[in-house]
């Protein structure tokens, strides 16, 4: 069991098992003021794996909740949201590693519970909480245009455009990029610009003037998943497939020296070092709880708002399908 010399420790309980658990425990051990106290699962094989990671196993979820201040949800079972609701009612802070139940009405209920209890929550999402995204955020001022080009995300075998989880992940990614420099803003307009059996083009328009164009493709040539962000003085280029991030600083050319059709020039490129094994979202969440700070983007209320946007997007896609047919 992980121990520490700190007296006033924040206790973390683990519900369920995922191969990411050893990484989580190592991170918790290295953060002063936290300790992983115990875990719980209803599956005997997961209990064994939890114990192999050095944790004692609680007798029940109630026992786990009583002994913990924060619940690290690794459970992927069907009752996931019921267990989340139960933890919120116990006034436990929640970090949910894998979200797999897309029920907007139930999320509305959880959103209200979070508002009533004041618990801190974080839902880890693949692209919004990717280390590359965390590398982008410090360089954002006010995005003017965002381009997303992700290959291999259309589900051709089932004759459907995109899984709900994919759309939700993209909505949350764009949500984080457009809220990092401002208070929570919403998408003003959604347009399905183009759709066919192999591609889907979507446009999100935001009240502050930013436009996000998303191109999803079913064909995998290079497994490319690229994001570009255009701002007044910088241009960011992020590749989620090979974990590369480039930042271009651009400056106006001196008109008195040379005349050119090009108004900007890249003068510097940075390549931040990214460690994919890190969980920056978990680190930020734990430190925010410890320091009583505002939660970073990714809470249950944030996710609920993104699900409402995703529902709107699904309706737009369904309507465009009717015209395509």
Image (cartoon, grey):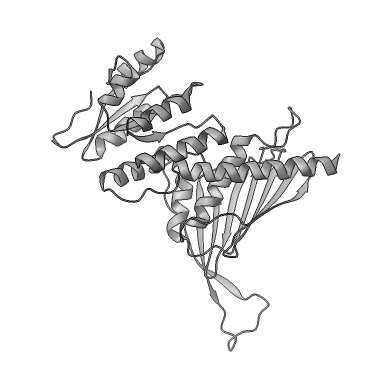
Q: Position of residue 260 (x, y in %)?
A: 66, 80
Residue at (17% x, 32% y) in the render: 4
Q: Nearer the viewer, residue 140 or 42?
A: 42
Pick the quarter of the image with the C terminus.
Answer: top right
Q: Is residue 255 above or below residue 165?
A: below
The image position of residue 171, as x and y in percent, is 58, 46
> Outermost residue, bottom direction?
256
Image vertical order of residue 114 relative to residue 157, above or below: below
Question: In which quadrant of the rendered view does residue 307 lie?
Answer: top right
Asked whether 80 or 252 is in front, the reply is 80
| Residue 310 placement: quadrant | top right
Q: Is residue 193 left or right of residue 163?
A: right
Q: Identify whether 169 is placed above or below 192.
A: above
> Does 30 sit above or below residue 192?
above
Q: Between residue 193 and residue 273, name the one nearer to us.
A: 193
Count of labels shown?
A: 0
Location of residue 51 in the rendering, given as x and y in whole percent from the top left corner: 30, 17
At 28% from the left and 48% from the top, the residue drawn is 292
Q: Is residue 194 left or right of residue 120?
A: right
Give residue 42's quadrant in the image: top left
Percent coordinates x, y for residue 234 in the rendering: 52, 66
Residue at (26, 48) in percent of width and height: 291
Residue 140 visible in the displayed image? yes
Residue 279 visible somewhere in the drawing: no
């Amino acid at each position: 069991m992980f121990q520490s010399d700190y007296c006033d420790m924040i206790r973390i309980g683990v519900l369920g098992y995922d191969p990411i658990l050893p990484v989580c425990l190592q991170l918790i051990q290295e953060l002063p003021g936290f300790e992983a106290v115990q875990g719980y699962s209803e599956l005997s094989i997961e209990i064994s794996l939890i114990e192999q990671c050095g944790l004692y196993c609680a007798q029940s979820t109630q026992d786990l909740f009583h002994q913990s201040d924060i619940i690290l949800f690794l459970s992927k079972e069907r009752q996931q949201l019921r267990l989340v609701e139960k933890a919120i009612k116990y006034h436990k802070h929640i970090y949910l590693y894998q979200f797999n139940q897309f029920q907007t009405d139930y999320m509305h209920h959880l959103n209200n519970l979070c508002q009533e209890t004041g618990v801190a929550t974080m839902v880890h999402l693949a692209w919004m909480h990717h280390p590359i995204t965390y590398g982008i955020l410090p360089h954002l001022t006010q995005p003017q245009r965002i381009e997303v080009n992700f290959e291999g995300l259309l589900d051709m075998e089932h004759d459907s455009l995109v899984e709900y989880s994919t759309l939700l992940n993209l909505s949350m990614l764009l949500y984080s990029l457009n809220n990092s420099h401002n208070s929570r803003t919403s998408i003003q307009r959604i347009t399905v610009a183009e759709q066919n059996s192999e591609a889907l083009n979507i446009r999100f328009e935001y009240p502050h003037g930013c436009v996000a164009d998303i191109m999803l493709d079913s064909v995998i040539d290079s497994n490319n998943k690229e994001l570009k962000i255009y701002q007044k003085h910088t241009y960011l280029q992020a590749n989620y497939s090979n974990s590369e991030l480039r930042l271009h600083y651009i400056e106006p050319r001196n008109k008195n020296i040379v005349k050119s059709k090009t108004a900007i020039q890249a003068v510097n490129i940075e390549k931040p070092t990214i460690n994919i094994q890190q969980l920056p979202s978990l680190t930020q969440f734990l430190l925010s709880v410890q320091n009583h700070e505002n939660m970073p983007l990714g809470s249950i209320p944030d996710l609920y708002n993104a699900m409402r946007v995703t529902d709107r997007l699904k309706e737009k896609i369904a309507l465009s399908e009717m015209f395509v047919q």
